[in-house]
Structures are given as C-alpha cells and as structure tokens.
Amino acid sequence: MPARAPETGAGRGGVFRRLGLVLMLAGLSAVVTLGALNPGSRDRAQIEPQTLAPPRFATTIRRPEPPAGASAGLDERGRQVSIACMVCHSTRTPNARNATMADLDEFHQGMHVAHGGLTCLSCHNADDYGALRLAGGARIEFADVQTLCAQCHAKIVRSYDHGAHGGMTGYWDLNRGGRVRNGCLDCHDPHAPAFPQMIPTFKPIDRFLEPAHG
Amino acid sequence: MAERRTSLPVLSRRTALKGAGAALGIGAFGVSISPLTKAIGELTLSDLLQKHYKELTDDERGRVLARFEAQAKDDLGVEVSIDDPKPIPGVKFVYAINLSVCNGNGKCVEACHKENNHDRASKQSYIRVLELPRGSTDLEGADSTYTHAVPAKDKYYLPVQCQQCDNPPCVKACPVEATWKEDDGIVVVDYSWCIGCRYCEAACPYHARRFNWQEPTIPPEEVNPDQGYLSNRIRPQGVVEKCHYCLHRTRKGRLPACLEACPTGARVFGNILDPESEIRWVLENKRVFFLKEELGTQPAFFYFFDD
C-alpha cells in the first residue's frame, strides 16, 4: 500500500512524489525485463538442463550371440556342418591339460589361436559349454563377454567406457537420438584378437601427384 | 589546297580510319568477353544476383534452397532436400583421432566421398591419410598413395582433414569473405560466393582445401539427397570446398560420416563445452597433440595415443 501514502501529502509535492514512484516502478520493471532478454543468460539457461539432465536416448552396446557350435567338416553336398557344443561336451569329461589346439586329436583342430598364454578353459566354462567362466569361477553368459575381457584389459575398458575406444553409429547428442556401439567381439576375434591387416580400397587422386609433363 | 578539300568524297580518310578502328574495337571486345558469356550461359539471373549467405533474409534463403533443389532435379533428376541447419547454442565441435588405433585403411576417406557428393572422376574427399615412419612427424616425408596392406611394419597413419582452426589462415586470405568461422567452430564456405581464386587453399597449412577443377560428376543413383547449403550440396565448377564436420548431420545431433565408417573406432567427436562428453574425457586424460602447433592456428582437431 505504499502508493497510497502520498495522498496524505498536500498539493504539488504529493503529485511529484506519486510521479517519482511510478517512474521508479517503471524503471525496475524495465531492468527485470531486460535481464530476461539478455542473450547471455538465455544461453546459459539452455545449456544447463542439457548437460545435467540424463540423456533422453539410450546407448546400446551390441552383444554377441552364443556360438552356433563347432565345425564338423563338410557334408556330401559340400556344405559346412556345425554341431552344437553340448552334443559332444555333455558326454565328455573336460581335460584341463588340453591347453592348445595342438593337444586335441579331434574337433577344433587347425583353429588359429593367438591370445597370449590363454588356454581353452581360461574363458570357456567346463561345467557348461553354453556359457563362459570368469577367472574367479563365476558363470557368465556369452552375451556378457565384455565383463570377461575386462578382467585383463582394464585400460582399454576405461577408454571404452568413456567413448574413446570402439566404433559407433548414431547421435553424438543423446538428447536428439540414440547410439549403437560395437562390442569387443564386433572387431576382435576372441581367439586371435589382434586387429587384422586391411587393404586400402579407396584413394583420392591428388592433382599434384600427376606426372608434371605427362 | 582549298580545291582539293572540296573535291574530297563524303568519306574522309579520318572518318574511314575512325570507322575501321571502332569496328575493330567492337570485334575485339566481343572476342574478349566471349569466355565470360560462355561461363554465364550456365548461370541463371537468380544465380548471378544472389546475395552473400549472411545477407540473405529467411525468405530469400528459403527461395535459394528451393532453387538449388529444383536445379538438382533438372540436372540429375534427383529429389534432394537442401537444408541450412544453424549452429546449436552452447555447442563447439571438436574432433580427435586415436593414432594408436588408426590403421590407415581409408574407410573414412571413402565415407566422406559418398556422404559429401564429391566428384566421382577425381575420387575427391576431404580426408587424406598420411603414412609416416614410426617416430617421425615430418609431414613432407609422408605418403598418401600407399596401396599395400595396412598397417605396414614400422609405419603409423595420420588422417588429415580441415582442422577447423580457431585462428584460421584461410579465412583471412579470402578476398571476398566467401569463407568464415561459425559459432560452433566450423569453418564454412559459401560456394555461391566463392570466386575460385584459391588463396585459401594456398594459405591452409594442412592442405585441407579442395578445388573443383571440373564440374563435379555423380551418377544420380549415388547422390546423397540429405544436403546442406554450407556443406554437401553439389558444388559448381571453379569453387573451393573443405571438410565442414558434416554439419548437415552434426548440427542435427548425428555423428559425422567418417566416424561412423571407421572400422577401428579411432575417431572421437563431440561438444567440448559439455563436461560429460567423450571428447572432453579424451582431452583431459589422453596424451594429446595437434598438428603444426607452432603456427598458432589453434585447431579444433586433436590427435592422441592410448599409452
């Protein structure tokens, strides 16, 4: 009710005081409006919710299917035949002494293995060949193989978890769309994980590389 | 003397020479401007009168985009959509490549070629992958034409494209302001304003700019219809172009085409102003460098190693 106060004052003084108050209020509201329109403060208001709120779209990591089975050679028409793991492994006793392919006298022979000093049962689960096994003995599904890889490759996993290792497609801005990331096995053969050599297929033709007086 | 003057015919020697001179002059002028008329022959009046990108009103820009779409339809019979996405407030794009992982296979080069509607004949691309002896950073000793299996023994690979410098020498060299730096850090070219003098190409220390020596040719079925005014719309002959971080994709939140194509996952892209972004983690935690630091170009493009 302060606007009523000047009414008690007499004559011109009261009018001027009332005018002054109106001007002051107008000035205040102008300052408030200008502040809201200030582009700097508006930008900040736009950035903060983007970075602080959880992203609206998900990152999907591709997970491997369980292997179809071992190769059992070719049939009479020349087609590959594979046998599900449990066909043989449900009836056979695992032999922990078989460390490499060279130790086997049937199946899995000739498979290229180059993964440090790992043996078959370093990763495969002798209790259930439909799954894998962590170093501590815990069972782990094929789909969750990255946890198994992470046991040894911690530095790579740290990079991977921060988006600095492994290919991806989709959106950099997860507020506008999702992202699909390669899992370990999309690029690395678990039995021979070194990335293979490639032949470059595409080369731009640089003008300066043409023969000068051709 | 007076008699001779009166007996002269209507055509005096002086008049005849004037006439001959004028005819010769007109003829010479015609011949001299004939290449110009030939060049203008392919341009419409609207092409010639188009304003600088920054001076276009929204209405005018809409008409320009519609005109380019109609031209693509006329020339190639392809329905294309030409957009003009603006920088996103609060976003500055930065790229980084993991040199411990890059194996020089060149899939990024090919992806750029296809995504950006490059000339098929010259196999143009904004990316050049350099093969260098391990331990050397002497770019003059680099080879970009290798065809053997990669990675070769004792070599490493350095993909080079526009570094989107914060202090870009190319922008300073342009005499007509046809190239400039946008708010999200991307250095762009208005292909309709470029006069093709190639000063920018000479000024770039990364050899990142390309010149369209010929009218770019692309089979209609291979044209990427998702286009941007400042990015991958089909360029005319005689203009300079360069990597624009796929702004027709990235300004809509998508990853650049070269990143998606990389089979080794060597490329990291994102918003450096977002503290949670992948690119920030790389810059804060990896051994990072940029090319030709001593020139003071301040690139928005980094290289790093895992170990």
Image (cartoon, coloured by chain):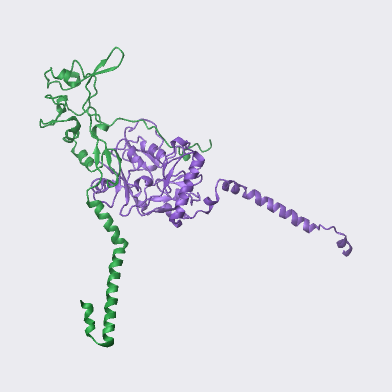
Chain colours: A green, B purple
Residue B68 in percent (x, y) is at 48, 46
Figure quadrant of the N terminus of chain B: bottom right
Q: Position of residue B178 (x, y in %)?
A: 46, 53
Residue B176 appears left or right of B12: left
Q: Please tell me whether residue B58 is drawn above or below residue B117 in the rendered image.
A: below
Q: Residue drawn at (27%, 80%), measured in percent from left and top?
A: A18
In terms of image quadrants, where is residue A123?
Answer: top left
Foreground pick, A144 / B151: A144
Q: Nearer the viewer, residue B14 or B79?
A: B79
Percent x, y of residue B185 = 35, 52
Q: Nearer the viewer, residue A29 or B92?
A: A29
The vertical placement of B127 against B169, above or below, is above
Q: Is residue A199 in view from this perspective?
A: yes
Q: Position of residue B96 (x, y in %)?
A: 31, 45
Seen as rendered, the residue at the extreme top is A76
Q: Where's the C terminus of chain B, which quadrant?
A: top left
Q: Is residue B47 above or below residue A185?
A: below
